[in-house]
Amino acid sequence: MAKPAAPASEPAPIVYVVDDDHSVRAALEDLLASMGLQVRAFESIAAFLQHPREDAPACLVLDVRMPGQSGLEFHRQMASHGLTLPVVFITGHGDIAMGVAAMKEGAIEFLTKPFRDQELLDAIHLGIERDRLRRREDDALDILRQRWVALTAGERDVVDGVVRGRLNKQIAAELGVSEITVKVRRANVMRKMQARTLVDLVRMYDRLGPG
């Protein structure tokens, strides 16, 4: 299977591999490199955490059983480290219950060694696509936040009234301004937020979740 294509402006995807078995790391590095993927391999979770995260779509291939903290324990704690990487588990000592638990907690796949190369590649490609989508959604949300910050306090007050279904005259009465002022602020909001319709504006507001 060909590697997932990245848009021209997007960095090449990276696969992080954490496994305490040197031979496994070497084999995975060779396999993934042969598919044109960038690979960063680590012998422990501690070593992985010390490595700076790179700004690119990525996936984490994680061994379940390692000295110290297990892969499953680390997976549960990733959010506390600010990590949102999709995870593909690999193990030589897994069981069905362990696999079910990992999948319920959001893992992409749970593969028992020895597994077919294609199974791993398919799971990694899925993980990279999910991370690529998350990155795009995060970028879109950042743009919305920048537009929201560009609004004046008065314009935000009008948005609050609009999303509560208030008419212009009702918003004007609540804010103690003229209806014309509300109309002007509302037009400014639509332009600054680049909302084509009120439905668009409400959806943007919901995504931002301002207090």
Image (cartoon, grey):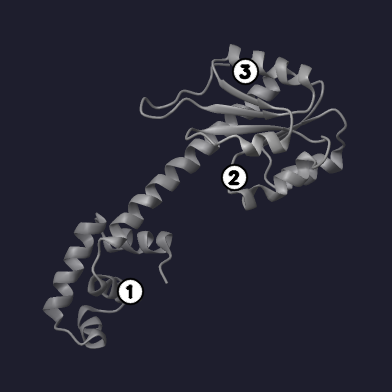
Tell me what residue is drawn at x 26 percent, y 59 percent: 197
Q: Amino acid at mark 1?
A: Asp
**Residue that carries the numbered disc 1 in the rendered image:** 160
Disc 3/disc 1 C-alpha distance (Å): 50 Å
> Which residue: 82% across, 40% down?
68
| Residue for badge 3 | 32
Asked where in the image residue 46 lies, by quadrant, the reply is top right
Residue at 46% from the left image edge and 41% from the top image edge: 135
Q: Which mark is residue 143?
A: none
Q: In this image, 5 relative to 113: left or right?
A: left
Where 87 sits versus 31, above or below? Answer: below
Q: Nearer the viewer, mark 3 or mark 2?
A: 2
Residue type marked 2: Leu
First in sequence: mark 2 vs mark 1: 2
Q: Which residue bears the numbered disc 2?
A: 83
| Left or right of residue 70: residue 16 | left
Q: Nearer the viewer, mark 3 or mark 1?
A: 3
Quadrant in which the N terminus is drawn: top right
